[in-house]
Amino acid sequence: MGCFTFIKVMMILFNLAIFLGGGALLGVGIWVSVDSSSFLKLFGAVSVANQFVNVGYFLIAIGAVLVLLGFLGCCGAQRESKCLLIIFFSIILIIFIAEIAGAVVALVYSSLAESLLKPLLEPVLKDQYGNQKDVTTIWNATMYDLECCGFSDYGDFNNSYYFNHNNQTYPFQCCTNLTSQCNLNAASSSHVSGCFKQLLATIKQYAAVVGGVAVGICVLELAAMVVSMYLYCHLDDKGGIH
Protein backbone atom coordinates (compact mmCIF):
# COMPACT_ATOMS: atom_id res chain seq x y z
CA MET A 1 0.00 0.00 0.00
CA GLY A 2 1.46 3.34 -1.10
CA CYS A 3 1.65 6.43 1.06
CA PHE A 4 -1.14 8.16 -0.87
CA THR A 5 -3.48 5.17 -0.52
CA PHE A 6 -2.73 4.78 3.20
CA ILE A 7 -3.43 8.46 3.91
CA LYS A 8 -6.60 8.27 1.82
CA VAL A 9 -7.90 5.27 3.79
CA MET A 10 -7.07 6.92 7.13
CA MET A 11 -8.80 10.11 5.96
CA ILE A 12 -11.93 8.13 5.13
CA LEU A 13 -11.97 6.25 8.44
CA PHE A 14 -11.25 9.38 10.49
CA ASN A 15 -14.02 11.38 8.83
CA LEU A 16 -16.43 8.46 9.04
CA ALA A 17 -15.91 8.53 12.83
CA ILE A 18 -16.49 12.31 12.79
CA PHE A 19 -19.69 11.83 10.76
CA LEU A 20 -21.07 9.20 13.16
CA GLY A 21 -20.09 11.25 16.23
CA GLY A 22 -21.73 14.33 14.75
CA GLY A 23 -24.89 12.36 14.03
CA ALA A 24 -24.99 11.17 17.65
CA LEU A 25 -24.56 14.74 18.96
CA LEU A 26 -27.22 15.96 16.56
CA GLY A 27 -29.65 13.33 17.82
CA VAL A 28 -28.96 14.14 21.47
CA GLY A 29 -29.32 17.87 20.77
CA ILE A 30 -32.73 17.35 19.16
CA TRP A 31 -33.80 15.16 22.09
CA VAL A 32 -32.72 17.78 24.64
CA SER A 33 -34.51 20.56 22.73
CA VAL A 34 -37.74 18.59 22.28
CA ASP A 35 -37.89 16.74 25.62
CA SER A 36 -35.75 18.67 28.11
CA SER A 37 -37.67 17.36 31.14
CA SER A 38 -36.64 13.76 30.41
CA PHE A 39 -33.03 14.89 29.96
CA LEU A 40 -33.12 16.60 33.36
CA LYS A 41 -34.52 13.51 35.06
CA LEU A 42 -31.93 11.24 33.45
CA PHE A 43 -28.79 13.35 33.87
CA GLY A 44 -29.68 15.54 36.84
CA ALA A 45 -26.66 17.64 37.85
CA VAL A 46 -24.98 17.16 34.48
CA SER A 47 -27.56 19.53 33.01
CA VAL A 48 -26.46 22.51 35.13
CA ALA A 49 -24.73 23.92 32.07
CA ASN A 50 -28.22 24.81 30.81
CA GLN A 51 -27.94 27.89 33.03
CA PHE A 52 -25.15 29.31 30.88
CA VAL A 53 -25.85 27.95 27.39
CA ASN A 54 -28.79 26.30 25.69
CA VAL A 55 -27.34 22.80 25.57
CA GLY A 56 -29.83 21.46 23.04
CA TYR A 57 -29.21 24.07 20.36
CA PHE A 58 -25.48 24.02 21.08
CA LEU A 59 -25.33 20.25 20.49
CA ILE A 60 -27.42 20.58 17.32
CA ALA A 61 -25.05 23.20 15.93
CA ILE A 62 -21.91 21.22 16.79
CA GLY A 63 -23.44 17.97 15.53
CA ALA A 64 -24.49 19.55 12.22
CA VAL A 65 -21.00 20.96 11.64
CA LEU A 66 -19.38 17.60 12.42
CA VAL A 67 -21.78 15.75 10.11
CA LEU A 68 -20.98 18.20 7.32
CA LEU A 69 -17.23 17.95 7.90
CA GLY A 70 -17.33 14.15 8.11
CA PHE A 71 -19.33 13.95 4.88
CA LEU A 72 -17.04 16.32 2.98
CA GLY A 73 -13.85 14.68 4.23
CA CYS A 74 -15.03 11.12 3.69
CA CYS A 75 -16.55 11.70 0.24
CA GLY A 76 -13.71 13.98 -0.82
CA ALA A 77 -11.14 11.30 -0.05
CA GLN A 78 -13.22 8.41 -1.40
CA ARG A 79 -14.11 10.11 -4.68
CA GLU A 80 -10.73 11.89 -4.85
CA SER A 81 -12.62 15.16 -5.37
CA LYS A 82 -10.50 18.30 -5.20
CA CYS A 83 -13.65 20.40 -4.83
CA LEU A 84 -14.86 18.57 -1.71
CA LEU A 85 -11.38 18.46 -0.21
CA ILE A 86 -10.83 22.20 -0.60
CA ILE A 87 -14.25 22.90 0.95
CA PHE A 88 -13.34 20.57 3.83
CA PHE A 89 -10.01 22.37 4.26
CA SER A 90 -11.65 25.81 4.13
CA ILE A 91 -14.27 25.00 6.77
CA ILE A 92 -11.68 23.61 9.20
CA LEU A 93 -9.47 26.65 8.56
CA ILE A 94 -12.37 28.98 9.36
CA ILE A 95 -13.16 27.03 12.54
CA PHE A 96 -9.49 27.10 13.55
CA ILE A 97 -9.23 30.87 13.04
CA ALA A 98 -12.51 31.39 14.92
CA GLU A 99 -11.21 29.33 17.86
CA ILE A 100 -8.00 31.35 18.04
CA ALA A 101 -9.96 34.60 17.83
CA GLY A 102 -12.41 33.36 20.46
CA ALA A 103 -9.58 32.43 22.82
CA VAL A 104 -8.03 35.89 22.42
CA VAL A 105 -11.38 37.61 23.00
CA ALA A 106 -12.07 35.39 26.04
CA LEU A 107 -8.72 36.33 27.57
CA VAL A 108 -9.15 40.03 26.87
CA TYR A 109 -12.81 40.40 27.81
CA SER A 110 -13.24 37.72 30.49
CA SER A 111 -13.76 40.47 33.06
CA LEU A 112 -16.87 41.58 31.13
CA ALA A 113 -18.51 38.14 31.20
CA GLU A 114 -20.21 38.69 34.53
CA SER A 115 -21.71 42.04 33.51
CA LEU A 116 -23.00 40.47 30.27
CA LEU A 117 -24.49 37.32 31.82
CA LYS A 118 -26.00 38.83 34.97
CA PRO A 119 -28.78 40.81 33.20
CA LEU A 120 -29.80 37.57 31.47
CA LEU A 121 -29.72 35.18 34.43
CA GLU A 122 -30.78 37.41 37.32
CA PRO A 123 -34.39 37.78 36.03
CA VAL A 124 -34.59 33.98 35.74
CA LEU A 125 -33.66 33.64 39.40
CA LYS A 126 -36.11 36.31 40.51
CA ASP A 127 -39.12 35.24 38.45
CA GLN A 128 -38.77 31.50 37.84
CA TYR A 129 -36.73 29.97 40.71
CA GLY A 130 -39.20 28.26 43.03
CA ASN A 131 -41.93 28.76 40.43
CA GLN A 132 -40.75 26.77 37.41
CA LYS A 133 -39.76 23.17 38.22
CA ASP A 134 -37.07 22.76 35.54
CA VAL A 135 -35.38 26.07 36.37
CA THR A 136 -35.48 25.31 40.10
CA THR A 137 -34.00 21.83 39.54
CA ILE A 138 -31.15 23.17 37.43
CA TRP A 139 -30.27 25.99 39.81
CA ASN A 140 -30.48 23.71 42.87
CA ALA A 141 -28.10 21.25 41.21
CA THR A 142 -25.77 24.09 40.22
CA MET A 143 -25.69 25.63 43.70
CA TYR A 144 -25.26 22.23 45.37
CA ASP A 145 -22.47 21.01 43.08
CA LEU A 146 -20.53 24.29 43.05
CA GLU A 147 -21.35 25.16 46.67
CA CYS A 148 -22.55 28.60 45.64
CA CYS A 149 -25.55 30.87 45.95
CA GLY A 150 -27.26 32.78 43.15
CA PHE A 151 -25.36 34.29 40.25
CA SER A 152 -23.36 36.91 42.19
CA ASP A 153 -24.46 36.22 45.80
CA TYR A 154 -27.56 35.72 47.96
CA GLY A 155 -28.72 39.24 47.08
CA ASP A 156 -29.94 37.94 43.71
CA PHE A 157 -32.89 36.38 45.53
CA ASN A 158 -34.07 39.62 47.18
CA ASN A 159 -37.70 40.33 46.24
CA SER A 160 -37.74 37.18 44.11
CA TYR A 161 -40.64 34.73 43.76
CA TYR A 162 -38.89 32.28 46.09
CA PHE A 163 -38.05 34.99 48.63
CA ASN A 164 -41.60 36.35 48.75
CA HIS A 165 -43.28 32.94 48.94
CA ASN A 166 -40.97 31.41 51.58
CA ASN A 167 -41.21 33.87 54.48
CA GLN A 168 -38.47 36.08 53.03
CA THR A 169 -35.82 33.38 53.27
CA TYR A 170 -33.12 32.21 50.88
CA PRO A 171 -32.32 28.74 49.50
CA PHE A 172 -30.46 26.59 52.02
CA GLN A 173 -27.39 26.59 49.76
CA CYS A 174 -26.92 30.29 50.63
CA CYS A 175 -26.16 29.47 54.27
CA THR A 176 -23.45 27.37 55.92
CA ASN A 177 -23.98 25.36 59.11
CA LEU A 178 -27.70 25.92 58.75
CA THR A 179 -29.74 24.97 61.82
CA SER A 180 -32.90 26.91 61.01
CA GLN A 181 -34.23 29.03 58.16
CA CYS A 182 -31.74 30.74 55.87
CA ASN A 183 -32.71 34.34 56.61
CA LEU A 184 -30.88 37.58 55.85
CA ASN A 185 -28.59 37.43 58.90
CA ALA A 186 -27.62 33.79 58.26
CA ALA A 187 -26.99 34.39 54.56
CA SER A 188 -24.94 37.56 55.06
CA SER A 189 -22.76 35.93 57.73
CA SER A 190 -22.18 32.77 55.65
CA HIS A 191 -20.33 34.57 52.83
CA VAL A 192 -21.23 31.92 50.24
CA SER A 193 -19.78 32.85 46.85
CA GLY A 194 -21.90 33.39 43.76
CA CYS A 195 -22.08 30.60 41.17
CA PHE A 196 -20.31 32.62 38.49
CA LYS A 197 -17.27 33.13 40.71
CA GLN A 198 -17.29 29.47 41.69
CA LEU A 199 -17.56 28.42 38.05
CA LEU A 200 -14.53 30.54 37.15
CA ALA A 201 -12.63 29.09 40.12
CA THR A 202 -13.50 25.55 38.98
CA ILE A 203 -12.36 26.30 35.43
CA LYS A 204 -9.07 27.71 36.73
CA GLN A 205 -8.65 24.61 38.91
CA TYR A 206 -8.88 22.40 35.82
CA ALA A 207 -7.16 24.88 33.49
CA ALA A 208 -4.45 22.34 32.59
CA VAL A 209 -7.05 19.78 31.48
CA VAL A 210 -9.08 22.37 29.57
CA GLY A 211 -5.91 23.72 27.94
CA GLY A 212 -4.76 20.21 27.03
CA VAL A 213 -8.08 19.39 25.39
CA ALA A 214 -8.01 22.69 23.48
CA VAL A 215 -4.47 22.04 22.26
CA GLY A 216 -5.43 18.50 21.26
CA ILE A 217 -8.36 19.78 19.21
CA CYS A 218 -6.13 22.35 17.49
CA VAL A 219 -3.56 19.67 16.68
CA LEU A 220 -6.27 17.43 15.15
CA GLU A 221 -7.55 20.35 13.10
CA LEU A 222 -4.06 21.15 11.84
CA ALA A 223 -3.49 17.47 11.00
CA ALA A 224 -6.80 17.32 9.12
CA MET A 225 -5.86 20.42 7.12
CA VAL A 226 -2.41 19.03 6.30
CA VAL A 227 -3.80 15.65 5.19
CA SER A 228 -6.60 17.18 3.12
CA MET A 229 -4.14 19.54 1.42
CA TYR A 230 -1.73 16.64 0.81
CA LEU A 231 -4.47 14.68 -0.94
CA TYR A 232 -5.57 17.79 -2.83
CA CYS A 233 -2.06 18.49 -4.13
CA HIS A 234 -1.39 14.87 -5.13
CA LEU A 235 -4.65 14.24 -6.96
CA ASP A 236 -3.19 15.56 -10.23
CA ASP A 237 -0.69 12.71 -10.17
CA LYS A 238 -3.47 10.22 -9.37
CA GLY A 239 -5.84 11.53 -11.99
CA GLY A 240 -8.43 12.56 -9.42
CA ILE A 241 -11.74 14.33 -10.04
CA HIS A 242 -11.51 18.14 -10.36
Image: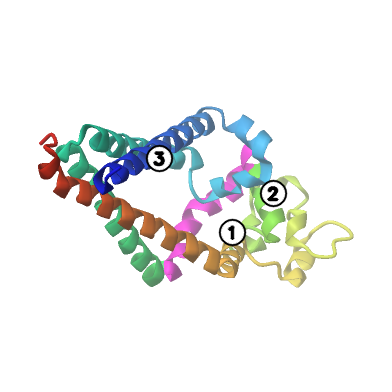
The amino acid beneath tag 1 is: Phe
- For mark 1, give the secondary structure: loop
Please name whichever residue, 136 or 169, is drawn nearer the observer in this view of the structure: 136
- For mark 2, give the secondary structure: helix
User: Looking at the image, is 205 positioned above or below residue 129?
Assistant: below
The amino acid beneath tag 2 is: Asn
Identify the image's colour scheme: rainbow, by chain, secondary structure or one colour: rainbow
Q: Mark 3 points at which residue?
A: 18
Q: Name the residue under label 2.
A: 140
> Can see residue 61?
no
Query: Label 3 to label 1, Cα distance in Å?
Result: 36 Å
Task: Answer with the quarter of the image where residue 133 lies.
Answer: top right
Q: Can you give x and y, in whole percent of width and height, for residue 198 in the image?
A: 62, 65
Left or right side of 28 for 16: left
Which of disc 2 and disc 3 is earlier in sequence? Answer: 3
Q: Mark 1 points at which residue?
A: 151
> Can see residue 173?
yes
Nearer the camera: disc 3 or disc 1: 3
